[in-house]
Image (cartoon, rainbow, N blue to C red):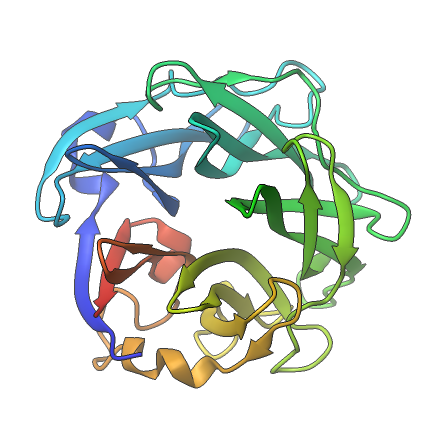
Amino acid sequence: MNWQRKGKIFDPTSDSFFVDLVGYAQSPQVLHLSDGHRVYFSTRVDDGSRKFKSVVGFVDFDLDFSSIQGRGCHDVIPLGELGGFDEHGIFPFSPTVAKDQVLAYTCGWSRRVSVSVETSTGLAMSNDGGRTFKKLGLGPIFSSALNEPFLVGDSFVRFYEDIFHMWYIYGTKWIDNQQTGSPERVYKIGYARSSNGVEWQRVRQGIISDKIGDEECQALPSVAYWKGQYHMVFCYRHPFDFRTNPEKGYRLGYAVSSNLRDWQRDDSALDSMLPTRKDDWDADMMCYPHFFAHANKLYLLYNGNQFGKFGFGLATAE
């Protein structure tokens, strides 16, 4: 794939509409509108506890992503109630259209004591074209299970041939970090399917091979159909020292499939995406991708340095 890097197209720290936030526009994901594209993302608010909560916002772009036409935040979808699976954040927020209904699969975050977080997948629906969403219920639709005991989330859903297909992450273990004293998580990508988008059957675990060892952490799978095949872009990193060491931080990975469940990894397909200068906004980290096909062109939205603190960028391929 010959990607053309368009650079960073949105920075929440320089947009006055988002002045009450603390930066971040993580995991940009698209809902196509009649006259443009709505890009949802997770940003952060200070809840006064020396920690932050992730809330969902969006920016509306024109058809060629050259200008912003509208914005929204805070009222897109509420966080969970006390003790809820999404009490402390929603990240990512993944929209899709199926059977003429605008749906969103959410990754709810809740804080833990022995480890930092637990995640599960929720479902919400919109009756105003994707401006706001109402949750199907207070609990998750897809969560930990016997062989996936924690950290189920990042669910990306598409409707192909009358079936809902989900690619998601699941935790394999928590491991002690001797340097920081805080456990770090390891997670892989799995695949599930459903007839109604609510009740899911797990089909296969570990569908993407490891590149940097069995403790490679894989996240944010996104899938698009293009020229007779299914293509996936995701991100991956080392389990330790990934926050400050660019050699251990997130990078983008790629895989291709003909049947949605068996995937052949080939990260070299994204070589033309790699930054060319050390001071590029994404030189230290490339993460949280959203890959899609639209109007006979391929698009890739993604975050750069510091996990998307300063926004997201765009690349295209004919």
Specify whether 234 is left or right of 20: right
Q: Position of residue 122 (x, y in %)?
A: 62, 30
For the N terminus, the quadrant is bottom left
- Counting from the top left corner in percent of width and height, residue 186 is at 70, 62
Apparent side of residue 40 relative to residue 166 in the rendered image (left or right): left
With respect to residue 245, does 212 lie above or below?
A: below
**Residue at x 58%, y 79% (from the top left corner):** 264
Q: Which quarter of the figure is the C terminus placed in?
A: bottom left
142 up-or-down from 277: above or below: above
Residue at the farthest front position: 161
Report whether residue 244 is seen: no
Residue at 61% across, 43% down: 163
Q: Residue drawn at (61%, 48%), measured in percent from left and top?
A: 166
The answer to whether 164 appears left or right of 128 in the picture is right
Residue 241 in percent (x, y) is at 57, 69
Question: In the rendered image of this protein, does residue 247 appear above or below residue 234?
Answer: below
Which quadrant of the view contains residue 212?
Answer: bottom right
Residue 299 placement (x, y as % from top left): 28, 59
Viewer-side residue, 44 vs 85? 85
